[in-house]
Image (tube, rainbow, N blue to C red):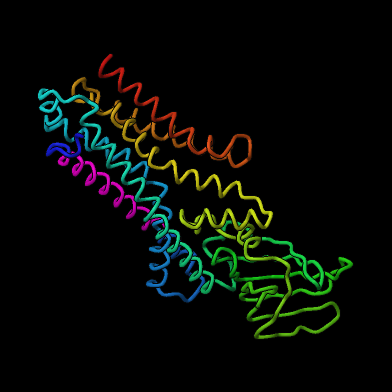
Amino acid sequence: MMIFTTVGRYMAKRFAITILGVFFVTLLLIFFVDFVEVLRSGARKDVSAGTLALITLLRIPIFAELTLPFAILIGTIAAFLSLSRTSELTIMRAAGLSVWQFVQPALIVAIFFGVFAVTVYNPVASAMKAKSEKIQAEIFQSEKSFATSRGTGSWLRQESVDGPTILHAKTSADRGLTLAGVTLLQFDPANRFYEQIQANKAELRQGYWRLEGVIVQSSGDAVRRYDEYFVSTYLGPAQIMNSLGSLETLSFWDLPGFIAFAGKAGLPTRQYELQHQLFLARPILMAAMVLIAATCSLKAFRFGKIQTMVLTGLTGGFGFFIFSELSRKVGASGLVPVTVAAWGPALVALLLSATVLLYQEDG
């Protein structure tokens, strides 16, 4: 294989360094943009800049994960253009190497990044995102946090021995098992409203919610305050996580167990199955990005029009992203099987770009 030769290792190193450079630049941009948003939201609370920076740092990896395919695309384009500018690709062609031989190191690097992103990076990013949600829930428990400032929080209807309850939480953490800024509207078994409960924090326990910092107002009674209060529920962890939990905090390794757990509880698992298939298809997605980059950058210096070719590649990558998102939405709605929704765009892009590259080189 080309990757085991000196030239192959050299090219793989060039691709890896360029891709990582693009990815780290993306990380910095995301940090600055998100930190400004966090500062603006944190201005309402007496929170140190260090704490807000920590929250931002914990949130960055999960956001940056979405940009990794574009880092592969842009990094590969940049690496190929650099090799062309220094005539290294010309020398390789003169030595008898085909386009498939010097694309091979880039493909292997991209597939490695895809596997690493799914098996190592994603679990770490998910854990960091869960930690950031927990910190922000503790800090912003009495008001909307920057995570939900544009929405209305989370709503949930539950049944219990005391009757139905409408629950509203401004923030959630620990996959929905810890809530902050909680309001509960209690109804009796005959569906008559009788009590409103406000709490700074709520934690799900076995068969009940444990509330902290509670204000209770019943019909016709004076307001009562409690440090601790309990509200019964029939809901279990799987139902809460399915309703209030963030999909981003479920890592690749957690998904199979959660899908089985939720399935046994009779809960819908389609979005989680789709997410798992998307993870499995990610190495193919990364390989497709390399071939898209190759189709628009290998001939740039040979035929001129570098800007046009690069713009074509970026447009193709962006169009592929839109196609992938559309496919994901269609898959989540149940119109197509999750395997088709997850694997279809990556395989189509891989085959189309390989066909175009084959036509360009072997015409």
By secondary structure, the bulk of the magenta-drawn segment is best described as: helix
* Residue displayed at 66% across by 60% down: 239
Question: In the image, is residue 33 part of the stretch drawn in magenta?
Answer: yes
Q: In this view, does 358 lie to the left or right of 239?
A: left
**For the image shown, how many numbered marks are present on the structure?**
0
Q: What stretch is highlighted in magenta?
A: 9-34
- Looking at the image, is 118 positioned above or below residue 36? above
* Viewer-proximal residue among 1 and 251: 1
User: From this viewpoint, which residue is outermost toward the top?
Assistant: 363
Q: Where is residue 313 in the image (x, y as percent from the top left)?
A: 34, 30
* Viewer-proximal residue among 283 and 313: 283
Q: Position of residue 10 (x, y in %)?
A: 15, 41
- Quarter of the view holding residue 215: bottom right
Question: In the image, is residue 269 part of the stretch drawn in magenta?
Answer: no
Which quadrant holds the C terminus?
Answer: top left
- Looking at the image, is 142 positioned above or below residue 282? below
Which quadrant holds the N terminus?
Answer: top left
* Residue displayed at 60% across by 34% down: 336
- Looking at the image, is 2 positioned above or below residue 263? above
- Quarter of the view holding residue 27: bottom left
User: From this viewpoint, which residue is outermost toward the right?
Assistant: 190
Q: Position of residue 180 (x, y in %)?
A: 60, 71
Q: Is residue 150 left or right of residue 349?
A: right
Q: In this view, does 343 lie to the left or right of 29?
A: right
* Residue displayed at 74% across by 79% down: 216
Q: Position of residue 190 (x, y in %)?
A: 89, 67
* Residue displayed at 41% across by 42% down: 282
